[in-house]
Amino acid sequence: MPAAGKTTVARRLERQHHALRFTPDEWLRELFPDQRTGVDEPTRTAIEALQWSMALRALEIGANVVLDYGLWGQSERDRFRSEAQALGARVVVCLLDPTRDELVARIERRNAELPAGAFHITDEVLDQALRTFQRPKPEELALFDDVI
């Protein structure tokens, strides 16, 4: 979810594991600095596809990679996991699942400060995200090499 803490965790993992971190919002803010509320879905999809192709190349040469992505749907998680594991990568998923109330509080703080690389998030965006997110079931989580 937006404001769940993905980037905070990704930055910590990046340092701990000497990893290459991919955060779409940071790239999008660099490419489109005048956009306050984000970009259209085809643009975001193109950036994520580029980042994933770079991540796969990094995995091929043995580098650690951290994806700072939502991975909201099971089919999306399945695809990323299987492609990485096919390269011999150990795949760990971090499940961040704060309550809606906590997300609202975080979004209010975030929107007030709007840190570099972040977009303004509306209640509508949060509600759409909550409707769209497919929470992983235990049997899906068992397919990862580790869950934290």
Image (cartoon, rainbow, N blue to C red):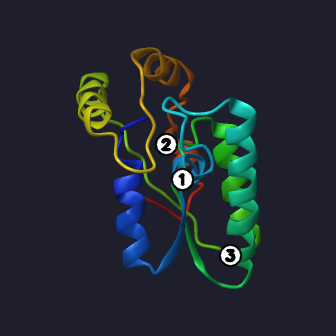
Dot 3 falls on a residue whose secondary structure is: helix
Q: How many marks?
A: 3
Mark 2 = which residue? Answer: 138
Q: Position of residue 81 (x, y in %)?
A: 66, 57
Q: Is residue 105 left or right of residue 125?
A: left
Query: Which comes sooner in the sequence, label 3 or label 1?
Result: 3
Q: Position of residue 92 (x, y in %)?
A: 51, 62
Which picture quadrant has residue 12? bottom left
Q: 33 above or below 100?
A: below
In-front residue for pair 146/51:
51
The three-letter amino acid code for the residue at tag 3 is: Leu
Q: Residue at x 29, y 24 (%)?
A: 104
Q: Is residue 27 left or right of residue 104?
A: right
Residues at badges 3 and 1 in contact (C-beta under 8 Å)?
Answer: no
Q: Position of residue 140 (x, y in %)?
A: 58, 45
Residues at badges 2 and 1 in contact (C-beta under 8 Å)?
Answer: yes
Query: Which comes sooner in the sequence, label 3 or label 2?
Result: 3
In-front residue for pair 1/121:
121
- Where, quadrant-wise, is the C terminus in this rendering? bottom left
Measure the C-alpha gap from mark 3 to mark 2. 26 Å
The three-letter amino acid code for the residue at tag 1 is: Ala
Mark 3 = which residue? Answer: 59
The three-letter amino acid code for the residue at tag 2 is: Pro
